[in-house]
Image (spheres, rainbow, N blue to C red):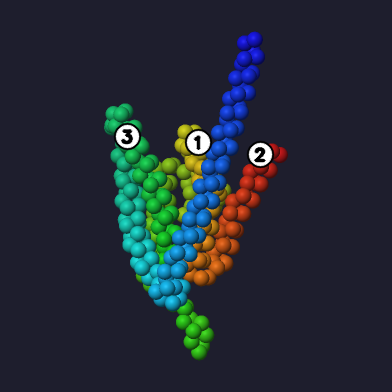
């Protein structure tokens, strides 16, 4: 009798869990469906206002110059912040390696060293993205009798050189703090070996976070990007064809790469 009640309890819990998952899935689908409809109506409303006042659709090229200077300012701030954290990590490691601290203070300095190093690493990755974005936004094309001429600004090309040099300096700090040899422009195999040099707790945290990033990118971020592109298509009166293809390629690539994981594990 006890065993029977136990089985019925397990069955009831499983049914409740299935119902909860169904409700959660329906809620998830409904949320994005409502967001898509709302953004569609909002885009149509904004497009109507723009056309009513100007007689033409809104052009995204008018936003290029303001976005470029905002991105440049963000690049300066993030690069300065990352450089400061890199110096903190290097100095903290030198201070900690002397071994003259108490156990409690030594643990605090250890966490400060690696936290600053990883924040600096993240900051420089963002700086690289902003640098590439600034170069692309600053390109000017002109049609001349000799053909189509593209112009670049030395400001953004110079920032690319500076960020690259700082990235090399960051790699040197990583080698010193982590005690692991890694090149300035590492391959995927090098990064895999670098990650596996971490302790078990840090590796588990990285793997869990990587899974969450992949899941959110696949199930949330990219679907939202589709909606945003749809709204922009309504506002500008132009189908964002290339943008749709790029986002779809990334979406398909993420899912296709999971075949490799399945094949390597279930040999």
Q: Position of residue 259 (x, y in %)?
A: 66, 47
Disc number at residue 193? none
> Residue 59 or 68: which is nearer the viewer?
59
The answer to whether 75 is drawn above or below residue 27 in the figure is below
C-alpha gap between disc 3 and disc 1: 21 Å
Asked if marks 3 and 1 touch (Cβ < 8 Å), the reply is: no
Asked if marks 1 and 2 touch (Cβ < 8 Å), the reply is: no
Q: Of marks 3 and 1, which one's residue comes earlier in the chain?
A: 3
Name the residue beneath numbered marker 2. Answer: 265
Residue at 42%, 55% in the rendered image: 126
C-alpha gap between disc 2 and disc 3: 39 Å
Name the residue beneath numbered marker 3. Answer: 108
Quadrant assignment for the N terminus: top right
Quadrant assignment for the C terminus: top right
Name the residue beneath numbered marker 1. Answer: 204
Residue at 51%, 70% in the rendered image: 237
> Residue 93 or 3: which is nearer the viewer?
3
C-alpha gap between disc 1 and disc 2: 18 Å
Helix, strand or loop under label 1: helix
Q: Of marks 2 and 3, which one's residue comes earlier in the chain?
A: 3
Closer to the observer: label 2 or label 3? 2
The answer to whether 121 is drawn above or below residue 266 in the figure is below
């Amino acid at each position: 009798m006890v065993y029977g009640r136990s089985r019925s309890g397990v069955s009831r819990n499983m049914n409740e869990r299935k119902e909860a998952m169904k409700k959660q899935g329906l809620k998830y689908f409904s949320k994005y469906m409502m967001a898509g409809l709302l953004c569609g109506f909002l885009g149509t409303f904004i497009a109507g206002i723009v056309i009513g006042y100007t007689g033409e659709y809104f052009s995204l090229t008018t936003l290029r110059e303001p976005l470029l200077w905002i991105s440049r300012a963000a690049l300066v701030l993030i690069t300065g912040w990352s450089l400061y954290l890199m110096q903190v990590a290097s100095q903290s490691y030198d201070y900690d390696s002397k071994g003259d601290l108490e156990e409690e203070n030594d643990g605090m300095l250890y966490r400060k060293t690696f936290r600053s190093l990883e924040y600096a690493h993240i900051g420089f990755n963002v700086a690289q993205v902003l640098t590439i974005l600034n170069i692309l936004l600053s390109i000017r094309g002109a049609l001349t009798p000799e053909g189509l001429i593209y112009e670049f600004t030395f400001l953004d090309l110079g920032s690319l050189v500076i960020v690259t040099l700082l990235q090399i300096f960051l790699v040197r700090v990583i080698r010193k703090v982590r005690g692991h040899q890694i090149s300035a422009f590492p391959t995927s195999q090098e990064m895999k070996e670098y990650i596996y040099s971490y302790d078990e707790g840090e590796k588990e945290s990285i793997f869990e976070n990587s899974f969450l990033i992949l899941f959110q990118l696949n199930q949330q971020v990219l679907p939202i990007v589709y909606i945003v592109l749809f709204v922009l298509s309504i506002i500008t009166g132009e189908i964002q064809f290339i943008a749709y293809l790029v986002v779809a390629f990334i979406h398909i690539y993420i899912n296709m790469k999971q075949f490799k994981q399945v094949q390597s594990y279930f040999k």
